[in-house]
Amino acid sequence: MIDKQTRIKIAIQKSGRLTEHSLDLLERCGLKYTRGRDQLIGYGENMPIDLLFVRDDDIPGLVRDDVCDLGIAGLNIIEEKRLEYGCDGIMAPYTEVCRLDYGHCRLAFGYPETGARQAITELDGATIATSYPFTVRDYLKRNDISADVVEFSGAVEIAPSLGRADVICDLVSTGTTMIANKIREGETILESQCMLIRTPVAIPEEKTAWVNRLLQRIEGVMQVRESKYIMMHAPKSALAEIRALLPGAESPTVLPLEGVDGRVAIHVVCRENVFWETLEALKDVGASSILVVPVEKMLA
Ligand code: PRT
Ligand code: ZN
């Protein structure tokens, strides 16, 4: 029995595209857990956090119903369920906390290569197959298009060849599935990535300190993903040029170099990846001994 009053419950995907990334994120936040015998619950050992392993489609509902305090799922599912619950009169079933920068994909129309319809301007009267009926209907309504939407729970891309739809609207990442099914990818109606959501009700006071701590750590993990610590020697006079060359850099630390006039050591954290071209440009303005090292942890 999990103590609801003191332990934070997080819903994550049991097994699928998001599972490994979500577990990796939580582990980077310092969470150690053991998985129960039924494998449905992970019990946090070093933090008052327990994980509920479920199908991604169930995550928004578990957070809406306050069974879980937090949930991690794709924006595609979160938005679809938000629209579905909105139809029940529930306007704000959960709060979107932050984007997690993995699970990137898009919900896009797909037009069979040999079909008569090839653009959204030709959708009036069409039948559209999708696993996201609420999102697609909402899009059609907002764009004043009158088309039929048929729901497919999977394998949407075969709907046209089965004669069940003229057009599809499905998730795409590399695009190879549509191409393999002779479907041309069209307009994107939703750009998606993984997202952290939280319950619409107030989190019990006993848990808020740990929730805030976790959110701060998640933010730190997201920030260090691309961050680099850069060290170099350079002419002091080139400082402004060097700052302009470094993407997302904070104020640099500038240190004198023992026995060298006019040159300094510069240390700086860059919030974005640093490419060879940047190092070459730094060298061109007089930098030398340039070192780029990954950042392990960061707390703003
Ligand atoms: O069992 P459960 O219900 O939990 O899992 P699921 O099968 O519904 O979901 P899963 O694991 O396939 O995907 C989970 C989430 O990953 C989705 O809700 C999206 O947020 C995200 N995601 C990212 C994707 C894709 N990329 C993706 N490419 N989800 C599905 N796809 C499909 C796509 O529709 C296509 O059929 O993968 C196929 C390959 O795509 P292409 O374009 O790379 O060929
Ligand atoms: Zn699913």
Image (cartoon, helix red, strand yellow):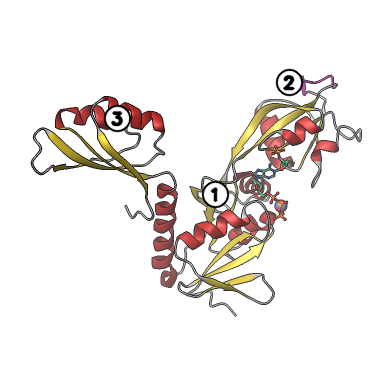
Residue annotated with mark 1: 195
Q: Which residue lies at the image location 37% right of the left edge and 50% below the top edge?
A: 295
Q: Secondary structure at mark 2?
A: loop
Measured Cα–Cα span from mark 3 to mark 1: 36 Å
Task: Please say whether residue 122 is one of the residues in the magenta stretch.
Answer: yes
- Residue 38 lies in what quarter of the image? bottom right
Residue 6, position as x, y percentages in the image: 47, 75
Left or right relative to 295: residue 173: right
Measured Cα–Cα span from mark 1 to mark 2: 30 Å
- Residue 181 lies in what quarter of the image? top right
Label 3 with label 1: CB-CB less than 8 Å: no
User: Of label 2 and label 3, which has the lower sequence position?
Assistant: 2
Q: Secondary structure at mark 3?
A: helix
Residue annotated with mark 3: 282
User: Of label 1 and label 2, which has the lower sequence position?
Assistant: 2
Label 2 with label 3: CB-CB less than 8 Å: no
Left or right relative to 36: residue 229: left
Task: Please state the extent of the stretch shown in magenta in the rendering.
Answer: 115-123
Residue 147, position as x, y percentages in the image: 79, 29
Which amino acid does the dot numbered 2 rest on?
Answer: Ala
